[in-house]
Image (tube, rainbow, N blue to C red):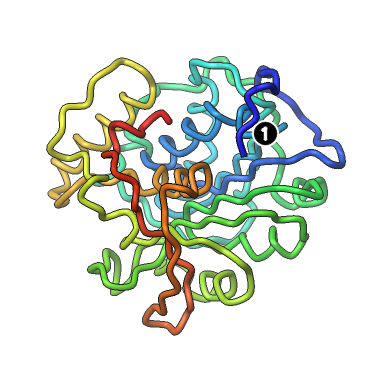
Amino acid sequence: MKNSSRPLASGGGTCYNEGMKTLVMCCDYGVDDAAATVDMLMHAAADAYDGAALVAIAGNVPAAVSLANAKKLVAHLPFRTVPVTVVDTTREVQPAEFLKHIHGNDGMGDLFADDRGFCAPVVPFSAWLETLPAAYDLLSLGPATLVPRILARGGVERLVLMGGNIAETPNYHGYEFNHALDRAAFSAVTQNFLHVAATMDTCRHPRLNVQPLAVEGEGLMARIVRRAQAMTHVSGEKGCYLWDDIAAKVLRHPEWFALRERTDRDGNVLTVAEYTHTEPYLKIMEQ
């Protein structure tokens, strides 16, 4: 999976050529989406991706807020990465909440004041679908509403989604949040496509809880994790898990996880990732 010989490229690419391996991320830009995006883009070239599409979906925030947050995040990346395209889904019908008590006033921890310096292309979702490459990995980190339309194009090589719960206590109306917002889409994806799910059971592992820990460093990942940690103290959550970045780790480091088939309350048979690595989250944060 790794290929450190591929040269880095600056952001701002626009088109994908046939045969490229692309990273597609569907993110409803909250704090943990930001962590996952930084993680994936930091390693994208070494992981043999030639480009990345950040599909700014609704979920934690409305689609327009998610789009604004994606642009702010890309504008403030402190490293060079593969060409990035931001995908605008504001014309698509999607379910959403605005969880300011969990993710801050802008939904992404209020980490950035503006998107000054942003220069990547922004493409409407329907137009972007027409340019989807023949080979891509898909990391779904919010409600799965638009995921079936992406998968219907074919070409997916690996599909990882953050969503669902088996034994862990649900966090939204009897379900995991992403699952709850669009149960039909979640079922359509998990029943019809090979996948690996980073469920609540995956993420709520003692070694992945950063709430009681001191997070050192001034890098962007450390700043994001500290902000997530602070927000859990405000919201009263028991534990702080970088849910979406754990799903990113499932995609990037499958050797850290065991796969088990589990059936959820809706009868979906999920291929659930179980964390078997011995290192705590802060040790693997930037790996």
Task: Tell me the crowding category of disc 1: few under 14, some 14 to 19, or many 20 or more residues within 10 angstroms, Cα based.
Answer: many
Point out residue 180 in the picture as x, y percentages from the top left corner.
Answer: 40, 69
Corner quadrant of residue 199:
bottom left
Q: Residue at x 63, y 54 (%)?
A: 158
Q: Residue at x 50, y 57 (%)?
A: 161
State left or right for residue 243 relative to residue 53.
left
Number of on-image labels: 1
Q: Tag 1: residue type?
A: Ala
Above or below, comparing residue 197 to residue 56 in the picture:
below
- Provide the residue designation for mark 1: 48
State left or right for residue 68 relative to residue 175.
right
Above or below, comparing residue 235 to residue 17 in the picture:
below
Q: Residue at x 34, y 52 (%)?
A: 276
Point out residue 31 in the picture as x, y percentages from the top left corner.
Answer: 36, 39
Q: Quadrant of the C terminus?
A: top left
Of 187 and 2, which appears nearest the observer? 2
Q: Residue at x 43, y 69 (%)?
A: 260
